[in-house]
Amino acid sequence: MWIRRWSLQEPGRVLAPLPLGSLWILPALALAGLLRVLPLVLGDTPAGVDSGLYVLYAEHLAASGTLPEELPHYQLGLTRWQYLPGVPFLLALAGWLAGEPPLAALPVVAVLASIEVGGILLLAWRLFGRLDAALFSAAIGAVMPISVEMVGWGGYANLLGLALLPFAYVSWLEYWRQPGFRSGGAFVVTACAVAMVHHLSGLWMLASVGAACLVGLAIEPVSSLRKIAAITPVGLIVGLPAVLFNWRAIASMGGATSLLTASERFVPTQSFVAESVASAGAALTIAILVPGLAALFFLRATSWIGKCVVFSHALTAVILGFGWLIGVHFHHWRALLFLGLPTAIAAGALMHLWSARLLRAVVSGALITSLAGIAVEEGRRVSIEYRILSPALEDAARWLRANSAPDDVIVTSNRIGFQLLRLLERPMMLAVPPRDFYSVRPAAQAVARDAFSILDGDREVIQRRGVRFIVVRAAGADVPDPKRSRDRLAPDTGLTLAFENPEVLVFRVATR
Amino acid sequence: MTKRGRPLLPLARALVGLWMAAGSLAVWLAGGDGGGLGWTWAAAVGSGAAAYVLVVAHVVRDIPVADPGPGVYRGRSAALLGGVLSALAILGCGPRSLPVVMIGLGVGATIVAQIIVPSGPSIGRGTPTPLRVRWAMLMVVAIVVAGLAMRTDWPDHAPGVWMLLSLFALVLPGLAFSQFLLSDRPLIERLLHAPAFSLGSLLIAVMWSDLLGVRIAMETTVAVGGAIGVGGLVMSLRESRDTEKE
C-alpha cells in the first residue's frame, strides 16, 4: 500500500497536452518582458553594473570568434574570466543580427523573461495538470520584483539560468517518467544550456535533480539506477566543455574544499542577505512560499518525484542563502534569487485551496497586482541607483585615455569600475567586496583590499601600488560610499582634482 | 474524519486566502520598503500560521472546485476585477507614463486570464491545440522577413530589428529540435520549449567549437541555426501532410 502511495511514477493524467486556453499565457509573457526591461528604459541610459563585463566579453567574442580567458586589466591582470559564454554569446548574436554593438542588445533580457515564464507554465502544468494553477504560477513568475532588481545590477547570467531551469526540470521529469532517446535528448540539451550559462544555475540543477535521483534510488533502486546510468555518460560527453570549464574555475578558486570552507570570504554576505530580506518583495515572497510549499507537500495530484525537484531546489536556496544561521560555511546572497521559481510553483499549489471562484480571483488578482506594483517601484529605484554607464562616465574615460600612459594604474570604486573596464584599457584596481569577488588568489584579493584602503585615503598604499589616478563618483551610490571617499581624498595634498563633471571625479596622484 | 466533521476548515482556508489578498495589497500600498524588517517579520509570522493551518489540519486534499459558471458571468467578472485592479496598479505607481500604463494593462489582462480559464483539474480533459506546423512556419517566415526588411530599410530601429531577428535565432533552431524531441506534444508546448532548445544547441556548438579551436563566427552560427530550423520545419511539414493524407 505504502509503496503504491510513494510510487515515483507520475500519474498519467498530468501528461495531458496543454489546452488551447494556455494561450492566455500571452499577457503574462508580455508583462514579464515589460517589467524586466524597465531598468533599461526608464533612465537616459540603461542601468547596470555587471553588464559592463558581459558587454566586454561579448565584444571580444564578436571580434575574435573565441571565448576569452585572459582579463588583462582587472585587478592588475591577476584574475581570469570566470564567465560562461551564455549571456555574452546572446548579446553578441543579437547585436550582430541588428548590425549594432552588443551594448545595444541589452534589452534582450525582455526575451529571457518571456522564456522563463513559458518554462514555469510548462513545469506547473506538469506538476498540477490544472490550467488555472499553471497560469497563476506563470503570472507570479512574471511579476517577481527580484527579477527586475537583477536586471538593474546586470545579473543577466542569473536571469538566463533561471529562465532555463524550468525546462531542464520538465525534461528531466519526462525522462524519469518515460526514459528514452527523445526524452533523454531533451534533458541533455536543456541541462547543458543551464550548465553553460552560470555556475550557480548549474549547481542548483545538479542539487535538485541529484536529490530527486537519491529519492528515486531509495524507493525504486533498480529502475532508477538504469535511468541514471543511461543518461549520465551522454550528458557528460555533450556537456564536456562546460564540465572542463567548471573544473578549471573551481581549481582557480583553490579547489572545492577551499571554496566550501573559506567562510571568511562570505561573511559580508550576511548583512547583504539581511538587507535583501527587508523589502516588500521579500515579504510577499515569504507569504506565498511558506503556505504554498505546505500545500504542495500535501497535494495528491503532484507526483513525489516532482515535489522532490521543487523542494530540493528551494532547500538548496535556503541553505546556501541562510546557511550562516546554522553554521554552514558556504553561503551566497545570490541564493535568494533562486527562490523565485519555487515561489511561483507554490502560488500554483495555493490555487488548489479555494473552491470558490471569486475567492481565487480576488487572491490571484491582489497578489499579481501587488507584486507588479512593487516590481514597477523596484524598476524605478534600480534605474536610478544602478545608472552607471552615462555620457559623463564615457567623457571621463576619454579624458583618462588621453591623459594617461598605457601602464598607469587606476583605482576605481566597484560599480563604475565594472563599466570603466570596458571603456579603458589601463591596469585597474577595483574595490570589489568579497561577496562579489570570485577569485581566491591571495594576490588578487590583496589588490581588492588595497583599493578599498586607497579610496579610504591610505597614502602608504597609494605609493606602494604606484597608483596614478583615482576615480570616484561625484553623485550617486557606489561601493565603498563615494561621499566618504571624496571627503577622505579631497584634503590630501598629494592628490590633484584633475577632471570633474557632474558624475565623476578623477584625482591625479602627484609624482615625486 | 469526514469533511462535514470539521466545518471550520473551509473557513480557515478562506481566511488564508483573504489574509494573502489583503496583506499583499497592504504591503504594496503602504510601501513595505520603508518599514525595514517589519513587513518581512509580519509576512513570516502570517505565512507560518497559514502553513500551520494547512499542515496540521491536513486540509489540502483533492478539494472539489466549483464548476465554471456561465461564460457571460465569467467574462464580466473578469473584466470588472481586471479593470479595477489594473487601474489600482496604474494609480498606485505614481505619475502615469507609457511603460507603467502598459504594465497596468498587462496586469489587467493577466488577471483576466486567471479568471477566464477553466478552473478545476484539466487532467485528462486537455485537447491538443488545433495549431499546425504550417502556421508556425508562416509566423517564423513573417518574423524573418520583417526583421530583414527592418534591418535594410530602417537601420535606426535596432531594438526592433534585434527583437525580431533574435526571435529568429532563438526560436527557429529550437523549434526543429522540439519537433523531433517532443513529437507527441502539441505545438504550443513545442513553441514554448523552442527557445531553451535553441539556446542549448547553440551553446553546445559554441563551447565545443572553442574547445576544438574552431572560430565562432556569428554568420556561421546563424546560418547553421537557420539551416537546422528550416530543415526541421520542412521535414515536419511533410510529415504532417503525410499524416493528413492517411
Image (spheres, grey):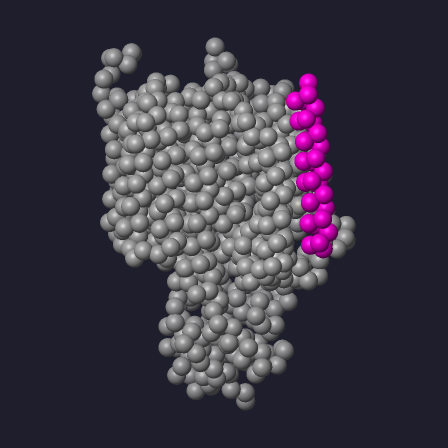
Q: How many marks?
A: 0
Q: Is residue B231 magenta?
A: yes
Q: Confirm whether residue A185 shows in the render.
A: yes
User: Quick check: A258 above or below B9?
Assistant: below
Q: Nearer the viewer, residue A213 or A420?
A: A420
Point 58% across, 60% down: residue: B154
Q: Nearer the viewer, residue B36 or A454?
A: B36
Point 54% across, 69% down: residue: A420
- The quadrant in which residue A361 appears is top left
Q: Nearer the viewer, residue A253 or B47?
A: B47
Residue A220 horizontal side relative to residue B220, left or right: left
Residue A403 horizontal side relative to residue A184, left or right: left
User: Quick check: A289 above or below A270?
Assistant: above
Residue A476 horizontal side relative to residue A239, left or right: left
Q: Is residue A30 magenta?
A: no
Q: Position of residue A8 (x, y in %)?
A: 53, 21
Point 55% across, 36% down: residue: B192
Point 28% across, 29% down: residue: A359
- Main SS, magenta region, reads helix
Q: Position of residue A489 (x, y in %)?
A: 42, 79
User: Quick check: B49 above or below A486?
Assistant: above
Range of residues picked out in magenta: B217-246
